[in-house]
Amino acid sequence: MPGFRDFNFKLLVIEKLMYEDRTLTPAFSIDELLRARGIRHTDVYVHENGLEFTVLDESRAYFEALEIGEELLATVDVLLVDGGNRVYYHCSPVWDGEDELFDVASLDDLDLLPNLRLVSGAQDCGIGVAFDEKLLAARGIASD
């Protein structure tokens, strides 16, 4: 199984495959995981434990361990860089988008996506700071 070097880049891929295409299953739900532990209100749990500005340990462990096969990675042709991505809720349920929590720091993982043709939204929000237009263009990847 291919391994990701940048956790936040992997989250963009998970957003595409798990929450948009629904080909990476089952979809992870932080609400369901916490309910199974007897926690009824995710936002209350986050606030009471001072976890507002972090990725929850439960989510990080799940997504870091999640293996994505080459066949699925080959289906990724578009990545959406958007503060409203559902995967971010499942990592940090009360994240307000006002910090660098989900900034992609490295594009080393582009090699894992042989059919990527577009990175959408990278120019519109801060979490796509690593998405250099020239680097993407040199790989045949458009950005908007």
Image (spheres, rainbow, N blue to C red):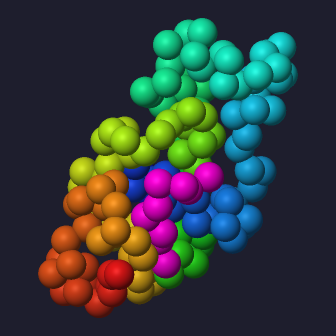
One can see residue 64 in this view: no
Q: Which residue, as the protein is rendered here, is positioned at the far bottom? A: 140
Image side of residue 43 versus residue 4, left or right: right
Q: Residue at x 70, y 25 (%)?
A: 42
Choose top left, top right, bottom left or bottom right for residue 119: bottom left
Choose top left, top right, bottom left or bottom right for residue 114: bottom left
Residue 47's place in the image compared with 77, above or below, is above
Range of the magenta residues? Answer: 78-86
Choose top left, top right, bottom left or bottom right for residue 30: top right
Q: Quadrant of the C terminus?
A: bottom left
How far from the left and from the top, in percent, is residue 53? 43, 27
Q: Residue at x 73, y 40 (%)?
A: 29
Total marks placed? 0
Is-magenta flag for residue 84? Answer: yes
Is-magenta flag for residue 35? Answer: no
Q: Nearer the viewer, residue 139 or 55?
A: 55
How far from the left and from the top, in percent, is residue 106? 24, 55
How far from the left and from the top, in percent, is residue 25? 75, 55
Residue 25's place in the image compared with 79, above or below, is above
Q: Residue at x 42, y 76 (%)?
A: 120
Image side of residue 124 versus residue 64, left or right: left
Residue 44's place in the image compared with 133, above or below, is above
Q: Residue at x 40, y 71 (%)?
A: 121
How far from the left and from the top, in percent, is residue 125? 34, 61
Q: Nearer the viewer, residue 119 or 138?
A: 119
Q: Nearer the viewer, residue 55 or 4?
A: 55
One can see residue 11 in this view: yes
Q: Which residue, as the protein is rendered here, is positioned at the far top? A: 48
